[in-house]
Amino acid sequence: MSAPRDFRQRAARAAANPAVAEMTGAICARIGGMRRAAVASFDRYEKVRELAAAIKLKNLDRLDEKLKVLIDRMQGHGAQVHLAVDAAEANNIITQIALDRSVRRIVKSKSMTAEEIGLNPALERAGLEVVETDLGDFICQLFDDPPSHILGPALHRTRFEIARLFSDKLGMAYDPTPGRMTMFAREVLREKFLGADMGLSGVNFAVAETGTLVLVTNEGNGRMSTTLPRIHVALMGLEKVVADLDDLGVFLDLLARSASGQKMSVYTSLLSGSRRPGEPDGPDEMHLVILDNGRSAILADPEMRPVLACLRCGACLNVCPIYRQVGGHAFGHAYSGPIGMVLTPLLVGLEEAGDLPQASTLCGACAGVCPVKIDHPRLLHVLRSRLDRAGSPLGGRVLLDAFAALGLSGPLFQTAAAAMQRALKLYAGPGRKLPGRLSGWTSCRDLIKPGGRSRPQGSE
C-alpha cells in the first residue's frame, strides 16, 4: 500500500476531526496503561530488554546463515519455501499457489507484511475470495478501510458505526453491545473457516534451529487459519528469524507485555510443517514465503539496520503524540507511528515517503518503550540528514551550513543569540506572527517574548 507524499494534507484532515484524536488518544492511553502495569510487575524487564536488543542485532549480523538453516529445517518438515524479492513477486507466488490448487476461499490471519505488499487486492484481482479473520481486520475489510494500528486495526471506528455496519452488511439486528457483536462475528467467521481451501498467516518469529514458525495471537483465528484449510501459506519478512528456542523465550517475555499489557498472549502457536501421516490435524500442504522487499538493502545499511529488530508490538504508536493526534491513516502506508516514520521510507524510498521522517517531535517516547531498544529519534535524524543532502534547495543548504558554522563557534553563537533576543523583545508579543515562509512556526502559536536568565533550581 502506498500513497503520494502528502502527509501534511492527510494529517490536517485528521486533525480537523476532533473525534480522531479523542478516540485514538483514549485507546492508546488505555493500552499504554496496561503495558506499564505489565512491565512494572516484571522485575527483570530492563535486563530482558537489554538481552533482546543484543540478540536481535546478533541475529541480524548472521541473518544469511540463519535463513539457510531455517529453509533446510522447514523443507525437512515437508514445507515448501519460496523466496520473494519484492511485493509483486510475493503476490504472484501466493496467487499462483492458490490458482494451481483450485482454491476458491482464503481465510487470513493478521499480517502487517501482507498489508505492506497489498496482498488482498492482488488475490481478489485473481478472482479469489479473501476473508480477514482477526476481528479488527474483519471490521476494516467490511468498511473497506486499511488498518489504523498494528494491534487495534479498527480503533478508529466506534461501536455504533460497527453495529450499523454489521446490520447493513451482515444482517445483524442493530445492537452496539460489543460482546454481542463479537459473538455474531464469530458465527459468521466460523462458516468461512469451515469452507476455506487455503489459510494465510503472518509470522511473528521463525526459529532456525528447529524449523518452527511462531504465531502470536489473542483470538483463535490464527490456529483456525493455519490448521483447518488443506493449504497453509505463511508470509514472513526475512528479518523474523531467531536462532533457537532460547532466543524465542526472551522475545515472548516482551512481546505481549509491550503490545497488550499481558504476560503472554492467549495463543502462541508453534508450526513445523504440514500434517504428517497419522496426525489428525493440520494442512496437507505448508508453504513459507520469505519476503525481501527492501530488507536486504536495510540490512546492508549499518546506520538503519536496527529498525529490522522491530517486533511489531505497536508500543511506539501508543506513546507518540503525532500518532495520537492524527491516527494511523494519516501516514498513508501500512506502517504508521514512529516505526512507520522510519521503516516506510526505507521500504518505498524517500522520494515516495520523505515526508514521514519529518512527522515527529523527536520527543524520544518511542525509544523509551521499545522492547528491543530501537532508537527511533536517532534513525529519524539520519533520514532527515539524507533528505537534506538529497533534496534541499541551494538556499536551504547554504542556510544549514551557515547555522552549522555558527554553532561551532562559541563567540559567534553568543553574539547571534544576543541579537535574536533583542529582536524578539522588540517584535514578539501576544498575537504577533512571523512573516513569509517563517509563518508556519506561528500558525498555531503566538511569538512570545524571551524570558529572563534562568536560575539553578533552589537558588535564591
Image (tube, grey):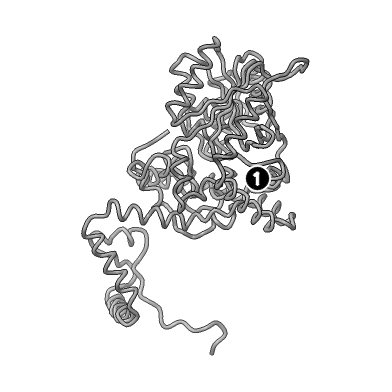
Does the image show residue 21? no
Query: Residue extending furthest top?
Result: 102
Q: Tell me if residue 173 comes above or below residue 325 in the rendering.
A: above
Which part of the image, by quadrant, shows the C terminus?
bottom right
The picture places residue 354, in percent across and down from the top left corner, at 36, 47
Question: The disc labelled 1 sits on which kind of residue?
Answer: Leu
Q: Residue at x 64, y 18 (%)?
A: 193
Residue identifier under label 1 = 255
Q: Give percent across and percent down for residue 6.
A: 34, 43
Q: Nearer the viewer, residue 13 or 301?
A: 301
Helix, strand, or loop for circle 1? helix
Query: Left or right: where does residue 439 sit relative to residue 109?
Result: left
Percent from the top left, x then y, of residue 324? 51, 49
| Residue 420 in view of the camera | yes
Residue 271 spot, x, y in % from top left? 68, 29
State whether residue 115 is above or below residue 407.
above
Q: Quadrant of residue 45?
A: bottom right
Residue located at (48% from left, 33% from top):
146
Judge left or right: residue 131 versus residue 177. left
The crowd level at tag 1 (other Cα within 10 Å; few <14, some 14-19, many 20+) is many
Of residue 351 and residue 432, the one placed in the foreground of this image is: 351
Residue 352 found in image quarter:
top left
Identify the image quadrant of the N terminus.
top left
Relative to 425, is 327 above or below? Answer: above
| Image height of 459 relative to 394, above or below | below
Q: Residue furthest bottom?
A: 460
Identify the residue at image location x=65%, y=42%: 243
Q: Identify which residue, 108 or 172, lies in the foreground.
A: 108
Residue toward you, 72 or 354: 72
| Number of numbered callouts drawn | 1
